Image (tube, rainbow, N blue to C red):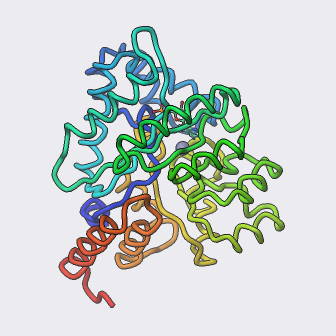
Amino acid sequence: MDLFCHKLPKIELHAHLNGSLSKLTLKQLGCLENSISQYQSVKAIGLKDAFALFKVAHEATSNTKNLYIATQNVIEEFAKDNVVYLELRTTPRSEEGMSEDDYIETVIKAIRENRFDGILVKLILSLDRRRSREEQTETLDRIIRFKNSFPDLIRGVDLSGDPAKGDFFRDIFEKARENGLKTAIHCAEIQNDAEVKNILEFKPDRLGHGTFIHTNPELWALYKQLNIPVECCLTSNVICLTANSYAEHHVQEWIKEKLPFCLATDDKGVFNTSLSEEFLHIHKASKLNELELWTISYKSIEYSFASAEEKNFLRFSLEKWKIKNIKDNE
Ligand SMILES: CNc1ncnc2c1ncn2[C@@H]1O[C@H](COP(=O)(O)O)[C@@H](O)[C@H]1O
Ligand SMILES: [Zn+2]
């Protein structure tokens, strides 16, 4: 099954650029050994300590040269894991000698100049919930400007950052939607029923994590009615201690109730995982067979922010792969 999960053409819809940096990349970017070794020891650390680790990556990508290399390497690593479609997300930020515009331009340049065989890459830009309404609005306006220049590449806006801090400002995301951007919002990563209700009522195109939605009957009923695809990041939740184990992960509710979900890595560097490993975990935890795993990948195409033509192309190539590689495929 290891080999099957590796070979399976996969769709990655929830990957944060800086959280995805491998140890090899951190080393290449001049990160010190003792910073990199913090990554090695990651087992069950909780959200707070996971957030401390993003600082290591952020230091490594604090100039455009390193940010370019980081983007290039992350795409190459996903391609090697047979991810055929990647929606990479990142939070525009400024550093000394690098403006937010420079940041976005560099990531766009790295994606456009590095077309690895067999992987289509799109960009989602993130708003950090720890930032003020004014700062988030300013970043959104910037994102809209870039989206108008690169509409095929920049497909959506995400809300992320420490779930214990900051806010979801609905009007900011309304504006994103009015300007033709899709929305993917981290939701219920920790218990916060009032905010979850606000987010659900906005009806984002996708939700990140969705961990605590089903624990509140009213929210669960509303969610099921809306039927919004959830990006499930199993290892991330197990390491951050918001899920007890792979077997008890909330994705089981989604499987049981036939609700829409995809599998994702979240931060493959920080959590030392890959999308193939995420498929292997769900195979073990939920006893899914090859055809069921393939179906998760296939359905994820629909939930992606790709164009109709791109979705058709991806469906066609996954169907072709299925005929060749899965026996008894009904
Ligand atoms: C573990 N669960 C999570 N929950 C919420 N936000 C997360 C996250 N994992 C990552 N991020 C967000 O992504 C940033 C790193 O990548 P970028 O600098 O954007 O490329 C983090 O600083 C955080 O804001
Ligand atoms: Zn995330």
Residue sitting at 37 percent across and 32 percent down? 21
* Count of numbered tags: 0
Q: Is residue 16 above or below residue 309?
A: above
Q: Quadrant of ligand 2?
A: top right
Q: Is residue 229 above or below residue 186?
A: below
- Between 7 and 248, the residue placed more toward the observer is 7
- Between 284 and 153, the residue placed more toward the observer is 153
Extreme top residue here?
96
Q: Quadrant of the C terminus?
A: bottom left
Residue 186 in picture, x, y percent from top left: 62, 47
Residue 244 in picture, x, y percent from top left: 65, 52
- Residue 48, image quadrant: top right
Q: Is residue 293 above or below residue 58?
A: below
Residue sitting at 30 percent across and 14 percent down? 30
Residue 260 in picture, x, y percent from top left: 55, 70
Q: Quadrant of the N terminus?
A: bottom left
Residue sitting at 71 percent across and 67 percent down? 223
Residue sitting at 70 percent across and 51 percent down? 188
Residue 319 in picture, x, y percent from top left: 26, 78
In this rendering, position of residue 144 left or right of residue 301: right
